[in-house]
Image (cartoon, rainbow, N blue to C red):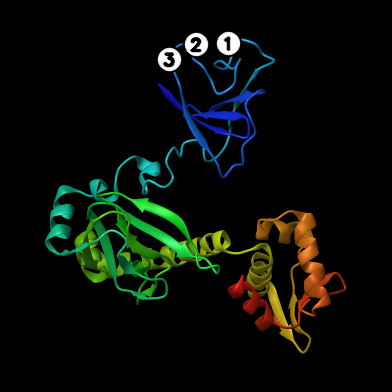
């Protein structure tokens, strides 16, 4: 029995193919209806004449092979299992798991109880012993964006891997009644690397810092409106390629409007409208084909407020 998702008249199969149904009703992407297709080639699909790809009326069914980096990620919210099929703890050797368990400080959380909030100093990693943990990021409108649901065996709190610690990115909470084991990052590295813990930590810290920067960018974009994303993208570009002078910050690299649109995850038309608004407000201007940001602080306020 194959599970499918119906989204905008197209059925997405777990096998990676898609069936397009010409008579299925249109639905918004946010309202995904789950259906099942029976094993029979004539099992009913969500439209009157739809059948499996390659069977039945070609006018009603169009088979499309999905070539996408997401093709193998069947359940992206179910922890980190999409990469190797195992929870984090199961990837460790038996002796490592036993040593780690011996150092855990165990605590239970009721459903909905907060484990930690964004911005708090990360000194420990957390192991899900029972139940499900929830990682989310607060949005400016007061709601939160769900990032991960972590089942038993998963580990989270990875910003603690940075040497000296780093602020938590997400809010961690109990999605169900939850039992967590907490281990200090120093103990974690000692268990994993033994006498080589200091040099391993230095390497992991460097890689984790890069990962944190990427996660912060992607997580922030989930919670920002387009104006805030454009402002944040301009700030990031100017920090990497900007030269400060009396006019403000000038980009030494030529950045096209298409590139800004790509960085901001918006259409060129809508991003150009935001840039024109910034230009009218004196936040952006062009000189000899290069972008100048006279007031980076004002852009930062827009990025944080959106």
Report helix, strand or loop for mark 1: loop
**Where is mark 3, residue-wise?**
39
Q: Which of 49 and 291 is in front in this view?
A: 49
Q: In which quarter of the image is the N terminus?
A: top left
Q: How crowded is mark 1: few (under 14 residues within 10 Å), some or many (20 or more)?
A: few
For the residues marked 2 and 1, what is the alpha-carbon distance in whole angstroms?
A: 7 Å
Mark 1 touches mark 3? (CB < 8 Å)? no
Report helix, strand or loop for mark 2: loop
Residue at (52, 40) in percent of width and height: 70
Identify the mark nearer the N-term, 1 or 3.
Answer: 3
Mark 2 touches mark 1? (CB < 8 Å)? yes
Q: Is residue 240 above or below residue 269?
A: below
**Where is mark 1, residue-wise?**
55
Residue at (60, 29) in percent of width and height: 10
Q: Which of 257 and 300 is in front in this view?
A: 300
**Where is mark 2, residue-wise?**
41
Identify the mark nearer the N-term, 2 or 1.
Answer: 2
Report helix, strand or loop for mark 3: loop
For residue 21, which quarter of the picture?
top right
Q: In this view, does 261 lie above or below 48?
A: below
Relative image position of residue 258 (x, y in whole percent): 76, 56
Q: How crowded is mark 3: few (under 14 residues within 10 Å), some or many (20 or more)?
A: few
Relative image position of residue 291 (x, y in whole percent): 79, 72
Asked if one can make out residue 254 in the rendered structure from this viewpoint, the answer is: no
For the residues marked 2 and 3, what is the alpha-carbon distance in whole angstroms?
A: 6 Å
Residue at (80, 62) in percent of width and height: 272
Q: Is residue 21 above or below residue 140?
A: above
Q: Is residue 167 left or right of residue 281?
A: left
């Amino acid at each position: 029995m194959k599970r499918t998702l119906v989204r905008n008249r197209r059925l997405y199969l777990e096998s990676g193919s898609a069936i397009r149904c010409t008579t299925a009703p249109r639905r918004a992407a946010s309202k995904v209806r789950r259906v099942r297709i029976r094993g029979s080639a004539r099992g009913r699909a969500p439209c009157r004449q739809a059948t499996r790809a390659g069977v039945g009326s070609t006018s009603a069914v169009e088979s499309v092979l999905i070539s996408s980096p997401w093709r193998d990620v069947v359940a992206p919210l179910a922890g980190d299992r999409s990469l190797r099929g195992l929870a984090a703890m199961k990837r460790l050797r038996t002796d490592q798991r036993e040593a780690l368990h011996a150092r855990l400080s165990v605590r239970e959380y009721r459903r909905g109880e907060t484990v930690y909030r964004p911005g708090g100093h990360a000194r420990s990693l957390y192991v899900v012993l029972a139940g499900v943990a929830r990682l989310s990021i607060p949005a400016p409108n007061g709601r939160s964006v769900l990032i991960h649901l972590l089942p038993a065996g998963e580990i989270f709190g990875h910003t603690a891997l940075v040497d000296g610690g780093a602020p938590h990115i997400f809010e961690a909470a109990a999605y169900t009644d939850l039992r967590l084991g907490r281990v200090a990052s120093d103990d974690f590295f000692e268990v994993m690397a033994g006498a080589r813990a200091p040099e391993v930590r230095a390497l992991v810290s460097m890689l984790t810092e890069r990962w944190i920067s990427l996660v912060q960018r992607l997580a922030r974009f989930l919670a920002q409106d387009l104006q805030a994303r454009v402002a944040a993208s301009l700030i990031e570009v100017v920090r990497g390629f900007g030269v400060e002078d009396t006019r403000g910050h000038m980009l030494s690299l030529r950045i096209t409007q298409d590139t800004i649109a790509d960085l901001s995850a918006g259409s060129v038309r809508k991003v150009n409208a935001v840039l024109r608004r910034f230009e009218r407000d004196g936040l952006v201007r062009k000189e000899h084909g290069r972008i100048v940001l006279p007031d980076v602080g004002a852009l930062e306020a827009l990025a944080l407020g959106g």
